[in-house]
Amino acid sequence: MAKEELIEMNGRVAEILPDSRYRVILDNGHELVAYTGGKMRKNHIRIIAGDLVSLELSPTT
């Protein structure tokens, strides 16, 4: 899948889950489980509940 096909959305971290996963509530009210990208994990960037995050979603076909 090409990078141009990703959908970018904003949300707020609601809950921290195991294995570097997070429950995120999007601006439109939808709730999903997200994970950190490679560089954020490599550089040990910490995300806590309440942080505003930007997500890239892949559309399903």
Image: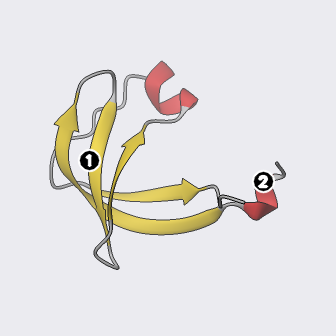
Picture quarter containing residue 47? top left
**Type of the residue with mark 1:** Arg
Please indicate whether residue 51 sits to the left or right of residue 55 in the image. left
Between residue 21 and residue 39, name the one nearer to us.
Answer: 21
Between residue 43 and residue 6, name the one nearer to us.
Answer: 6
Q: If you read the primary sequence from the N terminus, does the residue marked by circle 1 or circle 2 appear first? A: 2
Please indicate whether residue 60 sits to the left or right of residue 54 in the image. right
Secondary structure under badge 1?
Answer: strand
x and y, in percent, of residue 17 in the image: 22, 32
Mark number displayed over residue 3 = 2
Give the answer, above or below, for where 15 lies relative to 25.
Answer: above
Question: Label 1, on which residue?
Answer: 23
x and y, in percent, of residue 1 in the image: 82, 48
> Local crowd at mark 2 within 10 Å, few (<14), some, or many (≥20)?
few
Q: How far apart are marks 1 and 2 (CA)?
A: 24 Å
Please indicate whether residue 9 sits to the left or right of residue 20 in the image. right
Secondary structure under badge 2?
Answer: helix
Give the answer, above or below, for where 27 lies relative to 13.
Answer: below
Please indicate whether residue 58 sits to the left or right of residue 36 in the image. right
Coloring basis for residues? secondary structure
x and y, in percent, of residue 9 in the image: 48, 68
Residue lying at 84% horizontally and 52% vertically, measured from the top left: 2
Residue lying at 56% horizontally and 28% vertically, measured from the top left: 38
Viewer-nearest of discs 1 and 2: 1
Give the quarter of the figure containing the C terminus.
Answer: bottom right
Between residue 41 and residue 3, name the one nearer to us.
Answer: 3
Toward the bottom, the furthest residue is 28
Mark number displayed over residue 31 = none
> Local crowd at mark 1 within 10 Å, few (<14), some, or many (≥20)?
some
**Type of the residue with mark 2:** Lys
